[in-house]
Amino acid sequence: MELWYTEQQTEHIRFGIKVKEHLYTGQSEFQKVDVMDCHELGRTLTLDGLMMVNKKDEFIYHDMIAHVPMATNPTIKTVLVIGGGDGGTVRELCRYKTIEKIDMVEIDKLVVDVSREYLQFTSCALDDPRVNLYYEDGIEFVKDKKACYDLILVDSTDPIGPGEGLFTNEFYTNCHKALTEEGILVNQNESPYYDQFSHEFKRAHSKIKKIFPVSKVYQFHMPTYPSGHWLFGFASKGIDPVSNDNVDQWNTLGLETKYYNTEIHRGAFALPTYVKDMMADE
């Protein structure tokens, strides 16, 4: 008998993956957590039945959330990661010797525990001495922080359940306060393609651009996320991710990446017309 995992990506579209073995299922106070070993994709983490991480394409997401801001400002020393319980974002950050401190705030400890056990390909750097793990609400964590982070990465789920409050004016304002004068915020910004996701993208961008002097959007191709076309938001207090001289210096670091490079960096900010129109409408 064949076993298939099916994700309801929209009301009318489903995404199916053939499963070799269902390795884990559990329920935290926040969400249902599953790990499967899948044909083509390898080990896969889902939360409430939605794809979060798989071994085949996780490098795309984690390359683009981490290396774009790090190339934009190579002097970053202190980082806050909100979410990211699988550890992939922290893994990429730990490759930079210049980073001194990484605070990771994950509301659901079960996600971290399961990732440590089953997803070592993403969780392998969580024990780096520079990493401090906090199992609490990132929204509350950032409220009283002032000018203490050079970079904040919002590695969140969709704006439902535990991730809902990470798409609000109050949260983005608190992130602005928590950043240093050259601070950067990168946030998971949904997809522009299907209506239910593009609505959240437009809402998030319209809020952030009222708070940050520099507010841009960049894209990447994520095969297992709905539509495959996904976005990050980039916001800063002054540093532009495209028009600066730092980006090319990233090549001197000698970091090996599978998706990110400095040409992709600049090209990712060149958006399709329909996405630019959405941003203009807001």
Image: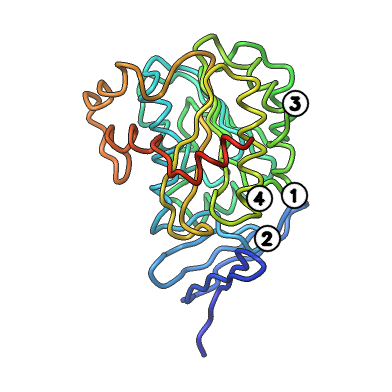
Amino acid marked by disc 1: Gly
Residue visible at 67% across and 26% down?
A: 172
Query: Quick one: label 2 or label 1, which is nearer the N terminus?
Result: 2
Pointer 2 or 4: first along the chain = 2
Going from the N terminus, do you reach mark 4 or mark 3 first? 4
- Per the rendering, the mark at residue 86 is none
Residue 217, percent from left and from top: 49, 34
Q: Earlier in the sequence, mark 2 or mark 3?
A: 2
Give the crowd class for mark 4: few <14, some 14-19, many >=20 residues within 10 Å: many
Q: Residues within 10 Å of mark 2 (few under 14, many from 20)?
A: some
- Mark 3 is on which residue type? Glu
What secondary structure is found at the residue carrying circle 4?
Answer: helix
**Of the numbered discs in the image, which one, if any, rests on residue 110?**
4
The residue beneath circle 3 is: 170
Tell me whether circle 2 and circle 1 mark residues in contact (CB < 8 Å): yes
Question: In front here: 256 or 213?
Answer: 213
Residues 119 and 218: in front is 218
- Amino acid type at image mark 2: Asp
Compared across the picture, whether 228 is left or right of 134 comes to left
* Vertical placement of residue 215 versus 88, above or below: above
Q: Which residue is mark 1?
A: 161
* Picture layout, residue 87 above or below residue 280: below
Place residue 177 in its image quadrant. Answer: top right
> In the figure, is residue 123 to the left or right of 179?
left
Element assignment for label 1: helix
At horizontal 42% and vertical 45% (from top left) the residue drawn is 220
- According to the image, label 2 marks what residue? 48
> Percent x, y for residue 51?
56, 59
Which circle, 2 or 3, is nearer the viewer?
Answer: 3
User: Which residue is pictured at 46% across the width and 62% down the height?
Assistant: 43
Q: Residue furthest right?
A: 29
